[in-house]
Amino acid sequence: MGIFNRVTDIVQANIVSILDKAEDPEKLLNLMISEMQDALTECRITTAALLCEEKTLKRQIENKNNNLVYWQDKAELAIERGRDDLAKSALLEKQAISNTVVAKQLQLETLQQSITKMTADCQRLQQKIAEAKAKQTQLVQRHNIVAARGQINSQLQSEKVAHALSRFEKVEQRVEGIEAQVEAYELTDSENTIAAQIDALAKNEQVDAELARLKADLKTNLKQSA
């Protein structure tokens, strides 16, 4: 494929449409940018070669035009000297050179058209590369945004888990507190029950002692009465 056809295909390509159909848009875009930059380099090299060729043609045409003047002067001189034969030969040389100039002029025009087209294609390629790089930046930004969102979601999930664990720990602490209170109450209640039983025993002993004294007093009184 020639450089003209290659550049035309690249310039006419719809980047967005191509990327929409690609399985890996970022990878494809990188390849496209690389290919377009290679094409731009080749386009510039070709344009430089055409410009050199244009200069060569212009110099050749200028030299031929000088030769036309030279043979025109020779023909006129020959006529002045009465040498029509030499004048005719000079005019024949002039005619041949004139034909060469016409051919080179046509070649120059075609070459200049190619230069114009190649220059325009280089500019369009630069615009296409800028468009592709802008799309590349968008893809990178989109990738970064997706990655950032994923990280945020991950952090949010972590925060949710931490929050749930924190709530569980608080509930667990409350349950442990309640259990401690119950245990303390049971222990206190148990201690109170034991103390009450011991106090009751002491009271019973006092009552028994008093009962014994009463019985003894009664026996003493009965004996004295008899």
Image: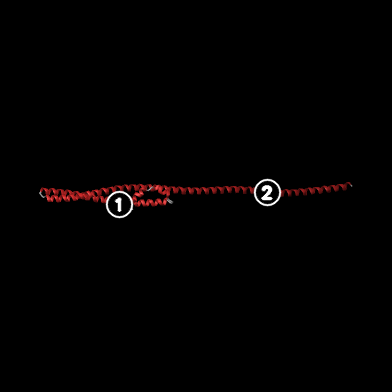
Most extreme residue toward the left is 82
Image-based side of 169 in relation to 224, left or right: left
Frontmost residue, 31 versus 173:
31
Q: Position of residue 201 (x, y in %)?
A: 75, 49
Callout 1 amino acid? Thr
Q: Which mark is residue 186?
A: 2
Most extreme residue toward the right is 226
Q: Which mark is residue 46?
A: 1
At 75% from the left and 48% from the top, the residue drawn is 200
As helix, strand or loop, the secondary structure at mark 2 comes to helix
- Is residue 110 among the parts visible in the rendering? yes
Q: Are marks 2 and 1 in contact (CB under 8 Å)?
A: no
- Is residue 58 among the parts visible in the rendering? no
Q: Position of residue 64 (x, y in %)?
A: 20, 50
Which one is closest to the eye, mark 2 or mark 1? Answer: 1
Frontmost residue, 177 versus 59:
59
At 52% from the left and 48% from the top, the residue drawn is 157
Image-based side of 161 in relation to 23, left or right: right
As helix, strand or loop, the secondary structure at mark 1 comes to helix
Callout 2 amino acid? Glu
